[in-house]
Amino acid sequence: MKIGIIGSGNVGTSLAKLLTNAGHDVLVGSRNGINSAQDVALHGDAVVLALHYHAVADALPPLADELDGKVVVDATNPLNDDWSPLLLGQENSAAEEIARLVPNAHVVKAFNTIFADVMSKEKMDRAGQKITAFVASDEDVALSTVAKLADDMGFASVTISKLSAARYLEAMAHLNIELAI
């Protein structure tokens, strides 16, 4: 499958390696890289957002046409500059905001609860237990597509058939980050 990744930081780079090793055709882009976000959006059948959440509002609207009909994987977490939670309200999430920015895309929340430093073949070996990758979407085909990608990379996907469940996944990530820092 052709996968585009917008963001060349730790998460984007780690996911790119895992996806490439799983046999997928991956193109990574960033604002300062060789490939632009538009290149990535045009390349991918699925496009992973692995950038800071605060950059999404500027990055996505110009890509709306390129993302029409595509699976858009939200791996972001809404954070302030000091890594504290950016609270979007009890009835909202970064994934739901992203779905409003690209209304004709098939938005899936995934990979936001996994730290980049364990997104490698070597670190994913947990005494025979796979790392859980939660995958949430309102759309069944997009949900199963991203769950398969997670499984291809070596994660154990757990699907949730509601994009609104991203509210809980983002809260889990906030807790993980709090514990880590």
Image (cartoon, rainbow, N blue to C red):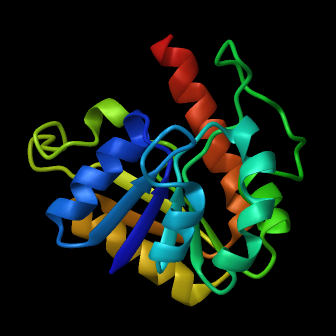
Residue 5: where, in percent of width, then height?
A: 46, 57
Q: Quadrant of residue 37?
A: bottom right
In the foreground, 26 or 71: 26
Can residue 104 be seen from the camera position used here? yes
Q: Is residue 156 found left or right of 161 in the rendered image?
A: left
Q: Can residue 115 be seen in this snapshot? A: no
Looking at the image, which residue is at 36% across and 77% down?
A: 2
Residue that extends furthest to the front in the rendered view of this protein: 34
Q: In screen coordinates, is 35 left or right of 166? A: left
Answer above or below: position of 154 versus 71. Answer: above
**What x and y, as percent, mark residue 120?**
20, 42
Number of numbered discs: 0
Viewer-side residue, 24 vs 80: 24
Q: Find residue 111 and report its horizontal and vertical position in percent.
A: 46, 51
Residue for point 89% across, 52% down = 91
User: Of residues 65 and 135, which is closer to you in this image?
Assistant: 65
User: Would you place residue 129 above or below residue 81 in this image?
Assistant: below
Name the side, left or right, on which 114 lies relative to 154.
right
Q: Give x and y (percent) for residue 6.
A: 52, 53
Q: Residue at x 70, y 18 (%)?
A: 84
* Residue at the (79%, 47%) spot, across then down: 58
Quadrant of image for the N terminus: bottom left
174 is higher (above) or lower (below) than 37: above
Nearer the observer, 37 or 18: 37
